[in-house]
Image (cartoon, rainbow, N blue to C red):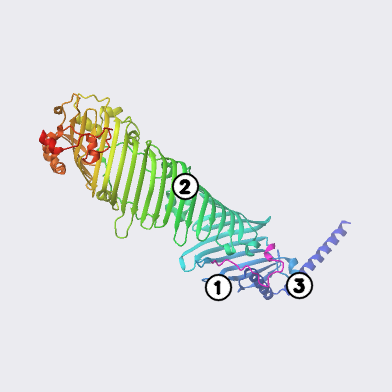
Amino acid sequence: MTRRFLRIAVILLAVVGLLVVAALIALRQAYPPSRLATMLAAHVSAITGRALHIDGELKFRLWPAIAIEANDISLANADWGSSPQMVHAGHVAFELSLQDLLHRELRILSVDVKGLDLNLESDGHGRFNWQLPHEKPAAAHKEGSSLDALEHFVVSDARVRYAISGRSSDTRQLDIDAFRLAVQGDGNAVDAAITLGKQLWKIEGRTGPIASLVGGSDAWPIELKFSTDGAWLSAQGTLGHGTSADTFEGKVSLRITSGAALPRFASAAAGLPMPVEVNAALSLTPRQLLAESMTLSMAGQQFTGRVSVQAEPALQVQADLTATTVDLARLHTSAAPALSPPTASKARPPLFGNAPLPFEDLPSIDAKVALRVGQLNLPGMPPISAFDLRLANTAGLLSLDPLDFTFGSGQVRTRIKVARRTGAAPRVDARVEARSVSVEALDAIGRSTGKRFNGGRANLDLTLAMAGQTPARLAASATGNVLLSVSGVPLAGKAATLDQDIVASLLEALLPKSTPRENLILQCVVARLPLRNGVATIDRSVAMETAQVAVSASGEVNLARQTIGLAFQPQAKKGLDIKAANLVELLLLTGPLQAPELSINPLGAAKQAADLGIAAATGGWSLLAPAFRAWRGASVCDFAASGGSGKGTAASGKGQQRPFRPIRDLLGR
């Protein structure tokens, strides 16, 4: 019985095999290579609207599936394209539906391409060569595109190039090592490996059906993830096609953990604080990129806001960013370390260096950036709060207006403009207005230990115009006015014992030795510098007062030579048991700005002061008229602040006193 069953089964299989072979032979005879080539070319042309050429061998493959194999196949380019072909493939295999073929119809089930060259291009005016006609020629399948049945699309050893017509330098290329698209539900699963530059990327995810893409749909859904060593990018949304070609609407996420992941931007990425992560709702067109509801995280510092980049008619960038807290030391891998206390004078570099500032590196694009930070932490400084920056840049002009913040419980308002002109040094205009800034906070800059002051407030008004490529040249050309006033500053800690601080050293030298040091209070300090081409001539416009003495200074501050030469003259306060004879007659502060030295009653002081230009700068009054030192008129701080009118707002808070009349006072004495 078993033998009989096996014999029948073998006979049936043989009959079926013979029938299949006969059918395949009949198909081969019914569809010779020339006819298949004609049908295939007409079919693809009907779908794409472009002519298909098969210049190589074409054959009918019967196993393992019925397929047409063609060599040297190409698809025509758009009529405006730079080359006659948009696509060229060395070998293509089209798997066909047997059932449809028996009904004399051609339905493609899968496509396998090897050795593909795909040339994508734009004419630069909104046309792209991959935009296919929406209208189907009469030869199209009556029931729709045959790609409805496409189950697999496989590509290997492919090169994709993209260029803008007339801009050969903008041509970009990526290599496709492997690409597989397979039907999955109502869409397709994608799995690919590509090489961009020298970087290998893996692509995985889902897309909409191929039929809707080729059929002219303007919105093709995608959900893809691109990953490489040190970075990944995910995109979920719709990719424009047809009339919306080269557009994207959706959500994107980008994470970079290593600058090596971006070899093309290696120099820029090297300074990025890792990791970098961006999430945004992205709208992309050929002329504009708009990222809204954006979160940007760098080294754990998070910003929120929006960014817009407009490509035409000229490149324009706009950004509006907000952050709660930012630590600048974490935001830059090469951020400057905390400032250290002053070292020996011989080891100190010049205050203004000759290294060129990066004016030439400023971009020439139109840009507007708004940045608000609740608290900004800088290395070696107390926190800055309520930071508000508006940056505007155009070709040749950069402005920071405003640059406002709160520091040491005081308000600081800054306006800076940098103008760049061809053939001329960059010009910088700066204006700073600071009100009621804590002296303790200012003293804490660059100081990790110790405390020199117990209170006090400082005001600053600065208006300067400068020109130059380096800090030294900018300082040497500085023209404008600087007014610094400080009030109510008790010295604390080591400062109360008068350590090496310049102000404390001045007091140590000027006060009689018997004066108590424990409760020294600087009632006021005023420095008014009228700068002209980097030189400030001081005629009693630098002054300070304690309860014991009033001190005024005359001389010169030279930013061009980076030197200082000041002569200080003390006056004993009324009602105190300090005699003028107990005070030093003259104290000189001279030397480089970064490390000046004090000398008390030096031999030949008058001649040395004259050599420094001090006597000449003041008309000789400070040195040639001994009576001047004993004059007890208006507050020296008021006089210094007002420029000699005696009507300034004294840092000490005193009211207006009698006018200063140097000639009358001198003759009267």
Which circle marks residue 26 in the picture?
3
At which x and y percent is residue 354?
28, 50
List the residue tagged with mark 2. 321
Q: CA distance from mark 3 to mark 2?
A: 71 Å
Q: Secondary structure at mark 1?
A: loop
User: Marks 3 and 2: which is nearer the front?
Assistant: 2
In the shown orientation, is residue 445 left or right of residue 311? left
Region of the chain picked out in magenta, as a range = 127-149
Using the rendered image of the protein, determine whether residue 559 is visible from the camera's viewpoint.
no
Disc 1 to disc 2, how far (Cα)?
Answer: 45 Å
Viewer-side label of 3, 1: 1
Q: Which residue is mark 1?
A: 79
Labels 1 and 2: the sequence-earlier one: 1
Q: Using the rendered image of the protein, determine whether residue 419 is visible from the camera's viewpoint.
A: yes
Image quarter (top left, top right, bottom left or bottom right) of the N terminus: bottom right
Amino acid marked by disc 1: Asp
Number of marks in the image? 3
Q: Give whichever of 62, 636 is nearer the camera.
A: 636
Residue 631 vs residue 233: left or right? Answer: left
Pinpoint residue 557: horizontal percent, then vertical percent: 22, 43
Q: Note whether 253 is above or below 53 in the view shown.
A: above
Disc 3, disc 2: CB below 8 Å?
Answer: no
Q: Secondary structure at mark 2?
A: strand
